[in-house]
Amino acid sequence: MNLGEKVWQVVNKWNYFSKDTVGKQLVRAADSISANLSEGFGRFHFKENKQFCYYSRGSLYETKTWLQKAHNRGLITNKDYSALQNNIETIAIKLNKYINTIGKK
């Protein structure tokens, strides 16, 4: 299951106020990671693809920040927080490796 879906499952259990403030930001940031990768992959030129990968990486770190805020505010269990942070770290490594291959022959 991808990060966006896991985040959705966690946020969906929150109360209205938490969903409306931190939750929406967290879900949007997490969903934006894969959306930007998809859009970049669909672009004609490799430079555009690379640019959208940078946007995706920005969204990844935004997701990390919102997760930290949610954890600090008691919205996420330690178990969920650790699992999601580990997932983010794995994605970051893979995304950076992918970015470094774009445009190379």
Image: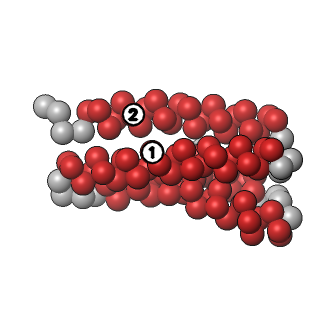
SS at mark 2 in the image: helix
At x 17% / y 53%, what residue is drawn? 45
Compare residues 78 and 21 and report the one nearer the observer.
21
- Could you tell me residue 25's position as x and y percent? 64, 61
- The numbered dot on residue 19 is none
First in residue order: circle 1 vs circle 2:
1
SS at mark 1 in the image: helix
Q: Look at mark 2 in the image and give the residue it sits on.
A: 96
Q: What is the CA distance from the residue labelled 1 to the residue labelled 2? A: 8 Å
Q: What amino acid is at disc 2? A: Asn
As drawn, the residue found furthest toward the left would be 105
- Could you tell me residue 57's position as x and y percent? 45, 45
- The numbered dot on residue 57 is 1
Label pair 1/2, CB-CB below 8 angstroms:
yes
53 lies left or right of 103: right
33 lies left or right of 104: right
52 lies left or right of 62: left
